[in-house]
Image: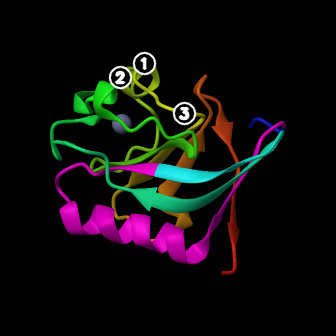
Amino acid sequence: MNAGLKISIDKELLDAILEGARRLYPKETILLLRGKKQENSIEISDLLVPPLAKYGRGFSSLPLHMLPMDFSIVGTAHSHPSGNLMPSHADLNHSFGVVLMITGFPFRNEQNVAVYNRSGEKVALHVTNP
Ligand SMILES: [Zn+2]
């Protein structure tokens, strides 16, 4: 656990991410996370569907050069239909932003969510307004 970074997300927003993952299962979903970044904390506030995302082809197919130059993007959220919450090598090599969120099958609640920083260290996720 990385104690230096605090990441929080509203319960409703987390539910929307999980629901999207359930809906596209068994394909992979990928979303961009927008938020407010402070010195040691990130508050995820919004989701964005990336342009030209090819669902089901894996995280590494996201055309990063097509992403908007938007500094409010703090990271990505993608699904693992396998249920494995560990980031793959491709996930770490192609990470975008500071937050790498992975949701795993069955996409039911925060037990099926893991968050990593860009070096692949697990970071606690604080769910607000449960
Ligand atoms: Zn992945």
Point out residue 33 in the picture as x, y percentages from the top left corner: 49, 51
Residue 104 percent location from the top left of the image: 39, 53
Identify residue type, mark 2.
Ala
- Lateral position of residue 48 relative to residue 35, left or right: left
Residue 79 part of the magenta-drawn span: no
Residue 88 located left or right of residue 60: right
Q: Which residue is mark 1?
A: 93
**The disc labelled 1 sits on which kind of residue?**
Asn
**Ligand 1 near label 1 (Cβ, under 8 Å)?**
no
Question: Residue 97's mark?
Answer: 3
**Residues marked 3 and 1 touching at CB (< 8 Å):** no
Which part of the image, by quadrant, shows the N terminus? Answer: top right
Mark 2 or 3, closer to the camera: 3
Alpha-carbon distance for marks 2 and 3? Answer: 15 Å
Give the mark toward the camera: 3 or 1: 3
Res 90 label: 2
Q: Secondary structure at mark 2?
A: helix
Which picture quadrant has residue 108?
Answer: bottom left
- Spatial CA distance of label 3 from label 1 is 12 Å
- Residues rendered magenta in the picture: 4-32
Ligand 1 placement by image quarter: top left
Q: Which mark is residue 110?
A: none
Which one is nearer the viewer's eye here, 81 or 31? 31
* Quadrant of the image occupied by residue 88: top left
Labelled pair 1, 2 in contact (Cβ < 8 Å): yes
